[in-house]
């Protein structure tokens, strides 16, 4: 049953889990939280999803929102977040003043700019064969966690740095997400002598098999600047092609100039640029 909270004469309804589908017509997963106006359908709502072990992501508000609706729904959402949530993010592609002001008034800060990029597949073949991909297996979990932690050392992505304090919990959270049958694939990039050079996470981008996304790509410090990241990305793209993908998506933050240069060189083009707002609780 939905929970109702009142803000003066403007009631806000809270939906969780299975109730989300009945409220907005689609499922966002068992841990989703949606706040909105009472009604069927609600004239306006704001959705939030877990983003990591102690992180939460707020999507764009939807529906016929008035100028005062977003601040109201945002305040209600922040009251409903679980106590273990320590960082909250929002990606804003609108660049409109009222949206940014609503988040800033709730204590958010503008964190980074984030580029959403894509290219059609197949991608070029890897020019060298210095890596082989090792798919994730339970008996290799320690090696994956160790490599993931090493990929975060001196990492230039502010989003990935949030996982540095507890890479095992971050990796476990990501691995447990349900993206449909065979929809989430971790790969280690192993050098010919068996040492890890980096790792990648390949995800379904949506329900269609034609779109996949590289959710994480990283190399260990001693392998940077030597072409391993390029080969790892191309080999991961080849796996997406074999899975039926026709487009490959990824995202990169503005401070990570080497990654931006690599992706552009491989034919990725920017779809959208987001302002990332971040609230540390």
Image (cartoon, rainbow, N blue to C red):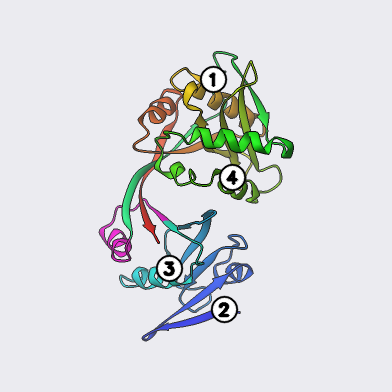
Residue depicted at x 48% and y 18%: 227
Upstream in the sequence, badge 2 or badge 3? 2
Residues at marks 2 and 4, CA–CA distance in whole angstroms? 35 Å
Residue depicted at x 65% and y 20%: 194
In-image side of 110 versus 22 (left or right): left
Residues at marks 1 and 3, CA–CA distance in whole angstroms? 45 Å
Residues at marks 2 and 3, CA–CA distance in whole angstroms? 17 Å
Q: Give the residue pinned by disc 4.
A: 168
**Element type at mark 4:** helix
Vertical placement of residue 154 versus 276, above or below: above
**Element type at mark 2:** loop
Q: In the figure, residue 101 lies in which quadrant?
A: bottom left
Q: In the figure, residue 113 lies in which quadrant?
A: top left
Vertical placement of residue 167 versus 229, above or below: below
Upstream in the sequence, badge 4 or badge 3? 3
Residue nearest the viewer, comparing 26 with 55: 55
């Amino acid at each position: 049953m939905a929970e109702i909270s009142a803000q003066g004469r403007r009631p806000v309804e809270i939906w969780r889990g299975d109730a989300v589908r009945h409220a907005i017509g689609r499922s966002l997963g068992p841990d989703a939280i949606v706040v909105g106006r009472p009604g069927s359908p609600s004239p306006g709502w704001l959705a939030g999803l877990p983003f990591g072990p102690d992180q939460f992501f707020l999507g764009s508000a939807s529906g016929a929102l008035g100028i005062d609706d977003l601040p109201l729904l945002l305040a209600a959402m922040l009251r409903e977040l679980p106590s273990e949530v320590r960082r909250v993010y929002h990606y804003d592609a609108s660049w409109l003043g009222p949206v940014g002001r609503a988040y800033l008034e709730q204590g958010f800060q503008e964190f980074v700019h984030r580029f959403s990029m894509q290219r059609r597949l197949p991608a070029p073949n890897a020019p060298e064969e210095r890596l082989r991909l090792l798919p994730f297996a339970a008996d290799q979990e320690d090696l994956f966690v160790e490599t993931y932690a090493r990929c975060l050392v001196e990492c230039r992505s502010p989003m990935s740095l949030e996982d540095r304090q507890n890479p095992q919990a971050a990796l476990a959270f990501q691995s447990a997400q349900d993206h449909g049958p065979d929809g989430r694939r971790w790969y280690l990039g192993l050098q010919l002598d068996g040492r890890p050079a980096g790792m990648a996470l390949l995800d379904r981008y949506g329900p269609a098999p034609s779109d996949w996304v590289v959710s994480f790509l990283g190399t260990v410090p001693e392998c940077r600047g030597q072409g391993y990241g390029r080969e790892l990305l191309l080999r991961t793209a080849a796996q997406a092609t074999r899975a039926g993908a026709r487009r490959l998506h990824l995202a990169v933050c503005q401070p990570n100039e080497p990654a931006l240069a690599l992706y552009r060189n491989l034919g990725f083009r920017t779809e959208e640029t987001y302002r990332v707002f971040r609230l540390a609780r």
